[in-house]
Image (cartoon, rainbow, N blue to C red):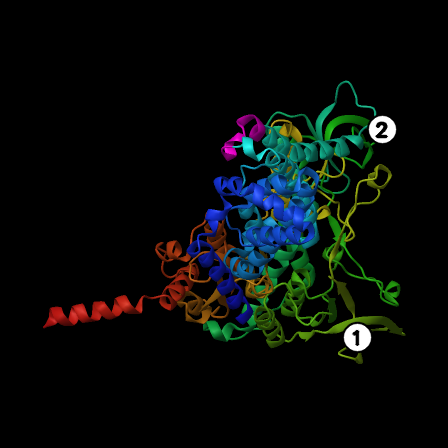
Amino acid sequence: MKVKIALIAAILALAVGFVYFDVGHYLTLEYIKSQQVQLAQLVAESPVRAGLFYFLIYVSIAALSLPGAAILTLLGGAIFGLWQGVVIVSFASTLGATLAMLASRFILRQQVVKRFGSQLKKIDTGIEKEGAFYLFSLRLVPAFPFFAINLLMGLTKISVPKFFIVSQVGMLAGTVVFVNAGTQLAQIETISDILSPTLIASFMLLGIFPLVAKRMIDFIAATKMLRNYSKPKSFDRDVIVIGAGSGGLVAALIAATVKAKVTLVEKHKMGGDCLNTGCVPSKSLLRSAKFAFDLRRGDQLGFAATEPDFDFKDVMARVQRIISSIEPHDSVERFESLGVDCAMAEARILSPYLVEVGGKVLSTRNIIVATGAAPFVPDIAGIEKVKVLTSDNLWALQNLPRRLIVLGGGPIGTELTQAFSRLGSHVTQVEALPNILNREDPEISAMMAEQLRSEGVAVLVNSTAIAIELEQQDKYLVVDSDGSQQRIEFDEILVAVGRKANVKGFGLEELGVEIAPQGTIVVDEYLRTNYPNIYAIGDVAGPYQFTHTASHMSWYATVNALFGSFKKFKVDYSVVPWATFCSPEVARVGLNETEATQQGLDFEVTKFDVAELDRALADEEAMGVVKVITQSGSDKILGVTIVADHAGDLISEYVLAMKHGLGLGKIMATIHIYPTMAEMNKFAAGEWRKAHKPDWALGLAGKYHAWRRN
């Protein structure tokens, strides 16, 4: 901080000195013209010393962003000639610009990050990808003040070497023009004699050229992938969607709605993982488990505590009944009635234009890959000796495991851990990381771990599965917990350590579609793969593996595929909510405290304890917290975490507020029904308001009321 203050003081002192001593008087066209002969003579007498002195003055003026660089450039041409002047001015201006950029970064960036971290993160991402092109374009156009470019670039993460080299090259054309004009100094009356409208227009065209060239390069690179494939003269389909999960269903429906001819291909079951093995069955199981849990705590609700009497087969039958009741929403019959051609078959991409569907080859203008993901089973010694349960095959289970091990502390593992524990299994949850629900703040993770432990779950963190061992009919998992090993006996083991994208077996490898190191399909901001007419959405593309984000991506991919020649839309991940449906639920949108700290943001944390909420008390669900991250000194919401019953529903108010720029003040001013769980959002906003109450105004109000009483 002391260094920063000293630097600011030095810059201010030099700027004040520049004005006080009227240094600008010496950097006018009239003055240098009057002194041209004397200055040229000094250069002739001592060219090295004069060149060095001129270089240092130029660097200082540019570094301090003071006016006069244009006049100095003319002077360089007048006293050093064209080529020597170009060399000196080019390096001096670039060095000065780089120093100005570094000063801006050192003095301002940290404060800007604290204030506008989320916005700056997007800019940094763009600068990392195309910063050189943008900087080069700006340097070519004299209409953009160079000092402003230096200061703004200092706020980004552009590297110093890249900034220096691009600036050196980008400013060269303008430097040559001004230095060359300086060689004819006597004929120049005003700067406008150099920067004619024609010349400015030429520079602007030059500035636009790199961006146009970049787009052309991108277009050529994309279309190059198609050159080796024969494009049909006509097409059977506008789009073929592979995979009928949540993403594929929405994509096909959008295409049919805008009257495109679309074929939706599914090799297994309509509805994909969400309906058949994911969201729907897991939430159905959780509801049954919650009822069993409520029976056991009946004394809290005014009844005798009762051990639930049930047959696990009936619970699983209910799960299948719920799936069957929802199936018509995603059925072939429904989607065909909406104009979608559905094919229950395997698809294979033969070319960017051809897809084999159940033995029949269809031509298509576009392909949308929505093949989802499958549970990842780690390579643990001896794992092949047992039948492993995953979220895919779990739903065929007919007997409640007496002893269940759940590998994984993420959302899926935590939900199923609690469900089976409440149904009566003795569950051990094994997580390699320091916390379960590791994406949440440590206090939130600890809250959920404590809840599971209070229900009888053995939660092991910092624990790695080493091997599975069999001894006659007994099965054991060997776990390394903080350096010490233990053997845990089990009847069933459920693996929920993550999901891997389904990218193999339907033509992507042969086609050369780019796959990321983490195994997902690489897509750009328009959801295109390295083939411009092949798109990918949902779990197979990431970055989020949620049903609602897959549906969200579907709109962008489908609209870009069908109407991208007119207008393309970049996928928007600015406000993405999610929830873990344990009890209490954990829901989040935006940043949490950990992420805000990691990004160096200047933020505040506001909390409301759910135990203080009347409805939560009435429902015997008085556990949890609302935790709001706001921009420091503002009610602007950066992120929210809710731990509470129905948190997945309650978070929606904050999602709406963040999406449309509404602050906590607006939420506090909104009437919420009493008594409801939704009141917690209003009360959290009230906590923020109390922390920001204007004490000075309240003091004046107190004095006013005292005066009125007397």
- Say what secondary structure mark 1 lies in: strand
The extreme left residue here reads: 710
Q: Is residue 645 magenta?
A: no
The residue at 53%/37% (across/down) is 143
Q: Is residue 443 visible?
A: yes
Residue labelled with disc 1: 479
**Left or right of 301 in this view: 337:** right
Q: What percent of the width, then of the height, locates residue 136?
A: 65, 41
Instruction: Report the magenta residues as a range.
Output: 189-201
Q: Who is closer to the viewer here, 127 or 462?
A: 127
Residue type at mark 1 is Val
Q: What percent of the width, then of the height, locates residue 620?
A: 47, 70
The residue at 79%/52% (across/down) is 517
Q: Quadrant of residue 367?
A: top right
CA separation in Å, label 1 and label 2: 52 Å
Q: Is residue 333 visible?
A: no
Residue labelled with disc 2: 228
The residue at 70%/73% (across/down) is 461
* Lower sequence index among marks 1 and 2: 2
Residue type at mark 2 is Asn
